[in-house]
Image (cartoon, rainbow, N blue to C red):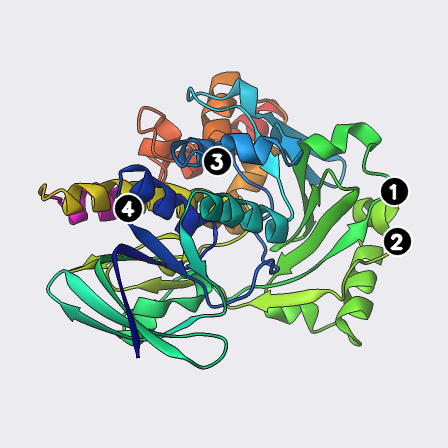
Amino acid sequence: MNKEKVDVLVIGAGPSGTVAASIVQQAGYDVKIVEKQKFPRFVIGESLLPGCMQALEAANFIEVLEAQGYQKKFGAKFVKDDFVCDYDFSDKFTKGWEWTWQVPRADFDKTLADALQGRGVQIDYETSVTDIQFNGNHSTTTATGPDGTQKQIEARFIIDSSGYGRVIPRLFNLDKPSDQPMRKTLFTHIRDEKRMLGGEPFRITIVVHRPGVWAWVIPFSNGTTSVGFVGAPEYFEQYSGTPEQQLRAIIASDPLISRRFEGMEYLFDPRILEAWSISTLQFYGDGFVLTGNVTEFLDPVFSSGVTLAVNSSMRAGQLTVKHLKGEKVDWEKDFTAFLMQGVNTFRSYVEAWYEGTLDTIFFAERQDEEIKRQVCSVLAGYVWDTDNPYVKNHDTALKRLARLIKIDHALSQ
């Protein structure tokens, strides 16, 4: 069996893995990535947030991404019937990046991985991790390549960025059920003949379709648009036929979405994703740290996935470098507490969305501009700015605001 030695083994070549690997390599350490799939490969999470840009910048990826000409995103629009709530990321409470991109993820992820390979990081595609043995902080990983050949990789540290593959949680029984209700999505890419209408390409649009059911509209610079519906699995059961027949029927039932997309060409058969929420018992241990969707994926509604993934991997990469230098690392304080600040803030907003609390806030007749700026910061991904009361008090502030809006509305009648 072939044997290799590296300083850091990264599992997974998605954005979480490539950001972590880049940061470790920039510090002068030998890093290797193993990836189960062959790139390019399809994945959702196509609308980024400004809050992820600092991590892409730290990983030295901004220039290569700029060269791809991806659709720039400057805000988010929420629509319910005739009501519209528009958030412009330049009018946010927190200082920082005011824009980001909307990207076909197959191309985006491969762009990052190719850039990293160009800098000398080896990526073994179609390679599955079948076993990991830890000896203190050091480890020996058994991996199987596309031809069935096995090899062992000795590493001083492992960063597990395997996403839904959840390599270390599954090998070591660390999976924990999420407290998020089960939801399902049906989605495709559509050749979009109307994408230039109303400034639509420059933001994501979220449409309230039914109570608890919503749709995303994410235009790309290549002339296509990602469209998907999200809701409880029971909602989709009323539609029969193939996934394409189901999606066309759902689109036809929504006045706004149907005006834009009814009868247009689908670029692939609509796909289904469900039961995505899962957590883990611990985010680190002797010799490893978990990043991105390996830790917890909440819901697609606020595009939090990539932001949490790359910020967690940026932090993991930085702390791994400190560990390799022999410096003391408080993984609980500096990693877990940091990550959970972001996860829990987004969780409060996801729950408020499905409970209807954000419905009351987004579509209120009168908007307090300072509060809107503070909420805008969260929607832009700045979920670690505890100077923002709608981050610091994320679990109570939204409900309090919704109650005040309802009182104000009642008094004005």
Which quarter of the rendering shows the N terminus?
bottom left
Alpha-carbon span between mark 3 and mark 2: 35 Å
Tell me the residue at 45%/25% (across/down). Answer: 374
Q: How crowded is mark 1: few (under 14 residues within 10 Å), some or many (20 or more)?
A: some
Q: Which amino acid, by three-letter code, is at mark 4?
A: Ala
Residue 296 in the figure: left or right of residue 69: left
Tell me the residue at 55%/40% (across/down). Answer: 48
Position of residue 387 relative to residue 243, above or below, is: above
Predominant secondary structure, magenta span: helix
Residue under numbered circle 1: 193
Alpha-carbon span between mark 2 and mark 1: 8 Å
Residue under numbered circle 2: 264
Is 133 magenta? The answer is no
Magenta region: which residues?
Answer: 329-338
Dot placed on the residue nearer the N-terminal end, 4 or 1: 1
Tell me the residue at 50%/69% (across/down). Answer: 126
Position of residue 293 relative to residue 63, above or below, is: below
Front-most of 320 and 239?
A: 320
- Which one is in front in this view, the residue at disc 4 or the one at disc 2? 4
Query: Which label was assigned to residue 61?
Result: 3
Q: In the structure shown, which secondary structural element does the residue marked by tag 2 occupy?
A: loop
- Tell me whether circle 3 and circle 2 mark residues in contact (CB < 8 Å): no
Residue under numbered circle 4: 316
